[in-house]
Amino acid sequence: MDQLAAVRRSWQRYRVLWSVQLAYMAEYRAEIVLWALSGVLPFVMLALWRQAAVPAAGFDAAGLGRYFLSAFVVRQFSVVWVVWQFEEDALQGRLSPYLLQPMHPFWRYVAAHQAEQATRLPFVLLIITGFFLLQPASFAWPGPPRLALGVLAVGLAFTLNFLMQSLIACLCFWSERASALERLLMIPTLFLSGLVAPLQTFPPGLRQLALATPFPYLIGFPAQLLAGGSFGPEQPFQLPLSLMVMVGWILLLLPPLRLLWRAGVRRYSAMGA
Amino acid sequence: MTLRRFWGTALATQLEYQLNALVELVAMVANLAGSLLVLWLFYRQGVALGGWSWHAAQVVLGAYTALSGFTSTLLQPNLSRIVTQVQEGGLDFVLLKPVDSQFWLSLRTFSLAGLPELVVGLGLMLWAALQERGELPPHALFATAVMLGAAAMILYTLWFALATTTIWFVKTWNATEVLRAALSAGRYPVSAYPPALRLLFTLVLPVAFLTTVPAQVLLGRSSGFWIGASLAMAALAFALCRAFWQFALRSYTSASS
């Protein structure tokens, strides 16, 4: 009974935090639209792959269009900037009051990200509508089960990305420039995730290598779910299995994050801040 | 000379952060490897992007890398400061200095981080062109240098024009991320895009002049028309950008008054 009440209290706290962040983000909607626009890369790559006119390993023109549109959408809802925010908060000492609050400071960042995603939503819907108006041939309704699975996969992709970035954010306790490391993480995210080329176009060896990392699950797998396409045994992703792999990665990242956080906080307070 | 003093101080600051330089270096190598990988994903299936051969397309990628290095060396460190200058009122002091304000704002500092990218990009251009042509005649090298200069000028005007808009709208610096993303289309020859985008990338967002034209000149496949067009574009862009800055200054009301 007590535990139930505690969960409810946390949930209420989180909701308040989220609505505060939403009001904050709504102030910056113009900036958020600019950030969203800076994700145009999938559309540039779509133009290239279309013009190249290769049957890119099982994609027809319409399917290719849906894949890159989905990649754009997935990217919009799985982008994580916790390192930058955390670095600023830690360097400027704003972290100290957060540590006193009866809630893990990272929930504040989760709320900020989710509020930002809510602000992006109308803009993303606008882009989707515009895309299908320009290219009606690409339109295909995924159907409720697939849509639900797609949303779940996007949520997992966001969680996975958030955990990876949080690990780097924790390094801010040791180095003043942890954001430089974030740049290194960005590179495989860009090239191995399926954002610039579907994993089906990778040669087999490289595909196996990519699938051994968490990156293809950040964009490629959720995009594949939303765009439709086969999940046969020769394809890079299989349906129940790939979802389980995502959950596996998340469970694998949680313990080191907790350890790193504890060690970091101990160090932070040792500095007398 | 003024520039030497400007850049001497910039160098001294940056030598403080040696680990950063290492990270930048690794990031550059990985980025280039990734770009080559994506290019190879097309060519391994026998696709010639816009009719360009594998080595010819690498010349374009080299030009892109060199210009990206130029951006991180000069444009990014200088122009990102205009925003803070406007927000915090530092621009007032810049305007009082007996130096041209646009010159000061554009060339005040430089960053070492982009230099390796610049060198590697030029190296890739030369190496790939040599593989493609078998020779590099001096006049082609000279013409390419001129074209890259024009490209750098066009790139500079795009960035400076964006930075200028902060005089009215303080928070437009994010727009440079959009510009960066759109310019990444220049990694590939412009003829690899569908006709509508080709037109856009030539006239509106002149990606074609940034990477494709210098590559064509180096490969000896360019006509005088494109060289002339590129120079005209650079001159026009600079004149417009200069006029825009002066126009913006007229409506500048300082943060402190």
Image (spheres, coloured by chain):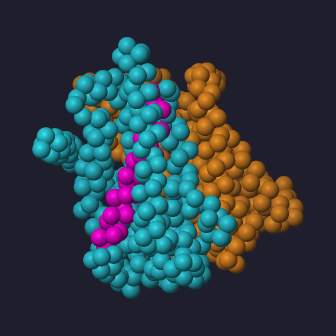
Percent coordinates x, y for residue B60 in the rendering: 67, 61
The residue segment tinted magenta is A147-173
Q: Give the drawing colour for chain A.
A: cyan
Question: Measuring 43% from the left and 27% from the top, which residue is drawn there?
Answer: A264
Q: Quadrant of the C terminus of chain B?
A: top left
Q: Nearer the viewer, residue B116 or B89?
A: B116
Question: Measuring 61% from the left and 51% from the top, which residue is drawn there?
Answer: B31
Was residue A160 drawn as part of the magenta stretch in this picture? yes
Percent coordinates x, y for residue B122 in the rendering: 72, 50
Report whether residue B18 is seen. yes
Q: Which quadrant of the structure image shows residue A57?
A: bottom right
In this rendering, the answer to whether B122 lies above or below B42 is above
Report whether residue B201 is seen. no
Q: Nearer the viewer, residue A107 or B92?
A: A107
Question: Measuring 83% from the left and 63% from the top, which residue is drawn there?
Answer: B131
Q: Residue furthest front?
A: A1
Question: Measuring 51% from the left and 61% from the top, which residue is drawn there?
Answer: A216
In this rendering, the answer to whether A225 lies above or below B74 is below
- The chain drawn in orange is B
Magenta segment, prevailing SS (helix, strand or loop): helix
